[in-house]
Image: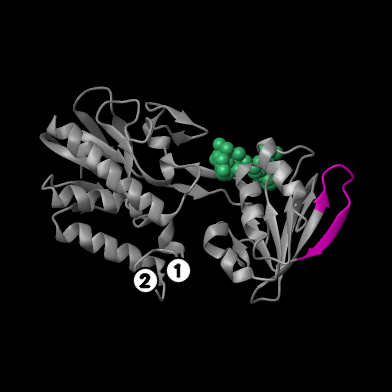
Amino acid sequence: MEQNNTATVRDVIVIGSGPAGYTAALYLARANFKPLVIAGALSAGGELMSTTLVENFPGFPDGIQGPDLMEAMRAQAKKFGAEIEYDDVTSIDLSHDIKIITTDSGTTYSCRAVIIATGSTYRKLGAPGEKEYAGKGVSYCATCDGFFFRDKKIVVLGGGDSAMTDADFLSRYGSSVTVIHRRDTFRASQILVDRAQENSKIDLLMNTIVTEICGDGEKVTGLKLKNTVTGEESELATDALFVAIGSEPQTAFLAGQIDCDHGYIVTEGSSTQTNLTGVFAAGDVADPIYRQAISAAGMGCRAALDAQHYLAN
Ligand code: NAP
């Protein structure tokens, strides 16, 4: 049933419910701004809901399951008065001081400040075996999972800055790191390519695509490859495939109203302010580099403080 809630102008609405969204909501709630979190109908909690053990979020020496961490963040924000709606934003009008937000259920809200914390999703390869072996050798986060592949053979797929920084990082763990890229030149900045070329543990395999991820049912054992120039097919034994082929910030509902760079929302300097007054961004939707739960949570805190400052003035 359609509902028009625009008669009540709220102070602030947080869109998204990963570590950035819930942290922003916690800070705003404790400051008595009574934030509404539009958490997503199916995606509430974000990427960590499909993660198993998180070992690098401070405060949990034995690690914590991703869904448990997100439930704790949700409960903490709610305890201090954050209101949470499990709905998706379908459109938004940010052109005036009062922002209008419409959701999939047909509800319309109005508010003075908005924090966008909708995250991003890792781009998937789409090859056979990718889904089956996700978390069993197929990974999208070198910082999170590199540790599990000490002295193992590692492959990194991609030719951008992420692939190069992942390869460099993973060379500290793996016995070898092979970077596989589909073209004959890298998209990555030259300094990162030079560093990879100088690293004796890293091999660069160009003009090559992964056509299948193979395993023994329990874990990844190798890859089927195809040369994009000669068409020649081959196999490569590996224990891990780190897919670093970019990610897709979730900004479609913004319909081009906010300045973005490579899809990521641009924020001003060290603040979380976007190019629009009263609109702030936090977490992976605005962070092409760090993309960690803890850095997203930190940015959520900063967005809440920036929004509070804006509302107070
Ligand atoms: P990206 O720049 O979009 O690069 C993605 C790479 O994956 C490209 O080389 C692309 O190949 C390849 N690719 C895409 N789809 C593929 C597919 N289906 N199969 C095989 N290969 C595929 O993404 P990114 O590396 O994640 O970087 C995103 C942004 O973050 C960039 O602005 C980057 O500069 C920034 N970043 C910076 C740092 C840093 O330390 N400064 C670190 C990480 C990221 P093609 O080249 O053929 O298109």
Residue at 21% x, 61% y is: 76
Residue 27 shown left or right of residue 232 in the figure: left
Q: Quadrant of residue 217?
A: bottom right
Point out the stretch of residues depicted in magenta.
226-237
- Seen from the viewer's position, the closer of residues 278 and 224 is 278
Residue ID for mark 2: 60
Whole-percent x, y for residue 36 in the image: 19, 47
Secondary structure, mark 1, is loop
- The percent position of residue 220, horizontal first and vertical second, equals 68, 69
Amino acid residing under circle 1? Glu
Q: Is residue 102 above or below residue 22?
A: above
Tell me the quadrant of the picture where the C terminus can be found: top left
Q: For disc 2, does the CB lie below 8 Å from ligand 1?
A: no
Secondary structure state at the residue bearing disc 2: loop
Residue 233: within the magenta? yes
Front residue of this view, candidates 218 and 303: 303
Magenta stretch contains residue 310 = no
N-terminal of the pair, mark 1 or mark 2, is 1
Label 1–label 2 contact, CB within 8 A: yes
Question: Which residue in the structure is indicated by mark 1?
Answer: 55
